C-alpha cells in the first residue's frame, strides 16, 4: 500500500514539474528555455539583484551559493546556477560555481515549492529531498525571504511574467 501512495505522490510531483495546473490557487510559474520553472525563479532573483534591490539579502546571507537542479531525485543536474550574496548588491549567474560557501541539489519541483514557501528547507533536507554540501551555517542563511516570492505580481514587476 505504501508503494502505491509513494508512486501517486511522485506522479503528482512530476505533473507539477511538467506544468500541470497548480492546485490550491498556487502561482503557475512560467517555464524558461530550459523547460524548468526554477530557471524563471533564478532569473527573477537575478533581475531583483540587478535592480539594486539585493543589498538586504547580501547583509543577511553574506555567502555564495551553488545550485544543481534535477528533473528527478538522483539524476544528474540539468540546470546549474550560482548566487553571490557576499559582494555588492548580489548577483545570480547561470552555470556551475567553484568555491561557493554552500551547494544545494534538488529537483525543479522541490526548488519551486521551497521558493513559494510551500516547503520547509530543513524538512526537505531531513527527508533527503535537498542535498547540501559545504558550510552548513551558510546554507541555513539561504532562506526564501531573501528574495521576493515568485508571485504573478513580482514576476510581472521584474518583466518575467511572459517568457
Image (cartoon, helix red, strand yellow):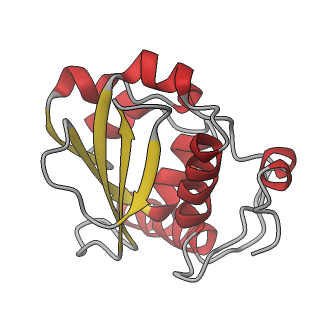
Image point 61% across, 74% down: which residue? 15
Q: Residue sitting at 61 percent across and 39 percent down? A: 118
* Residue 162 quadrant: bottom right
Residue in view at x 46 percent, y 37 percent: 90
The one of 55 and 160 positioned closer to us in this rendering: 55
Residue located at (14% from left, 54% from top): 98
Query: Which image quadrant: the C terminus?
Result: bottom right
Tally of marks: 0
**Relative horizontal placement of residue 86, taking residue 90 as reference (left or right):** left
**Of the pair 148 and 14, the residue shown nearer to us:** 148
User: Is residue 126 found left or right of 12 in the rendered image?
Assistant: left
Question: In the image shown, does 58 or 67 lie closer to the viewer?
Answer: 58
- 156 displayed left or right of 129: right
Residue 20 position in % (x across, y down): 71, 73
The quadrant the N terminus occupies is bottom left
Name the image quarter holding residue 74.
Answer: bottom left
Q: Can residue 137 be seen here?
A: yes
- Judge whether residue 1 can be spotted in this image: no
Query: Can you give x and y, in whole percent of width and height, for residue 116 in the image?
Result: 64, 42
Q: Is residue 25 left or right of residue 132?
A: right
Q: Is residue 118 above or below residue 131?
A: above
Indicate the position of residue 108 as horizontal and vertical percent values. Answer: 47, 63
From this view, report whether residue 98 is shown above or below residue 133: below
Image spot of residue 103 (x, y percent): 22, 46
Amino acid at each position: 500500500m505504501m508503494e502505491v501512495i509513494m508512486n501517486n505522490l511522485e506522479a503528482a510531483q512530476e505533473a507539477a514539474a511538467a506544468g500541470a495546473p497548480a492546485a490550491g490557487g498556487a502561482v503557475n510559474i512560467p517555464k524558461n528555455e530550459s523547460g524548468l520553472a526554477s530557471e524563471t525563479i533564478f532569473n527573477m532573483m537575478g533581475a531583483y539583484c540587478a535592480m539594486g534591490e539585493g543589498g538586504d539579502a547580501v547583509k543577511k546571507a553574506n555567502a555564495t551559493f551553488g545550485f544543481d537542479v534535477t528533473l528527478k531525485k538522483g539524476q544528474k543536474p540539468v540546470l546549474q546556477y550560482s548566487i553571490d550574496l557576499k559582494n555588492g548588491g548580489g548577483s545570480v549567474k547561470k552555470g556551475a560555481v567553484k568555491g561557493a560557501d554552500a551547494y544545494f541539489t534538488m529537483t525543479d519541483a522541490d526548488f519551486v515549492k521551497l521558493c513559494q514557501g510551500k516547503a520547509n528547507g530543513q524538512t526537505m533536507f531531513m527527508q533527503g529531498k535537498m542535498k547540501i554540501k559545504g558550510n552548513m551555517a551558510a546554507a541555513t542563511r539561504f532562506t526564501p525571504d531573501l528574495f521576493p516570492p515568485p508571485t504573478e505580481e513580482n514576476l510581472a514587476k521584474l518583466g518575467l511574467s511572459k517568457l
